[in-house]
């Protein structure tokens, strides 16, 4: 793993505002995450996991957050098919992460007895 010189990063932050915040976004919205020079080093070392912690996502939800992002907030049905795989129908779309976490694979689509809306 490369080592990062904190003094160099501090100097870069003083001269280049682009290094002071990181953009994190998808179709559900964008956000700028302000970072200190020390946090930039942590981000460079830990990658996306550092950002997830910074925005309040618990480590046990990292994989779920990535799935939420990949599904654009669309919760999927909890029913299983005759083949034993999950139904691919959506039960709601563009939910924020907390709502998605509660609904994903826990609610049913209209075909499987859920709300027909």
Image: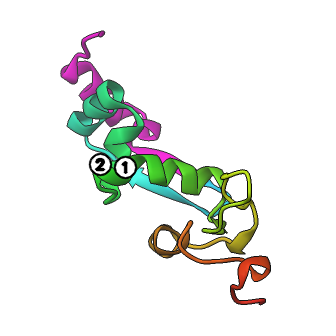
Relative to 93, 65 lies left or right: left
Residue at position x 30%, y 9% in the image: 2
Question: Crowding near pointer 2: few (<14 within 10 Å), some, many (20+)?
Answer: few
The residue indicated by pointer 1 is: 52
Residue at position x 42%, y 34% in the image: 16
Are the two marked residues, 2 and 1, in contact with CB atoms closer than 8 angstroms? yes
Span colored in magenta: 1-24
Give the position of the C terminus as an image quadrant: bottom right
- What is the secondary structure assignment of the residue under circle 2? helix
- What is the secondary structure assignment of the residue under circle 1? helix
In the displayed structure, would residue 107 be above or below residue 43?
A: below
Q: CA distance from mark 2 to mark 1?
A: 8 Å
Outermost residue, front side: 82
Relative to 28, 55 lies left or right: left
Q: Is residue 33 magenta?
A: no
Residue 59: image tag: 2
């Amino acid at each position: 793993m490369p080592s990062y010189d904190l003094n160099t990063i501090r100097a870069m932050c003083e001269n280049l505002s682009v290094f002071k915040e990181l953009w994190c976004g998808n179709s559900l919205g964008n956000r700028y995450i302000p970072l200190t020079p020390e946090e930039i080093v942590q981000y460079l070392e830990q990658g996306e996991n550092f950002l997830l912690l910074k925005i309040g996502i618990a480590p046990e939800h990292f994989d779920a957050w990535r799935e939420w992002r990949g599904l654009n907030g669309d919760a999927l049905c909890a029913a299983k098919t005759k083949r034993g795989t999950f139904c691919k129908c959506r039960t709601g779309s563009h939910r924020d992460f907390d709502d998605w976490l509660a609904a994903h694979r826990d609610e049913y689509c209209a075909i499987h007895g859920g709300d027909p809306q």
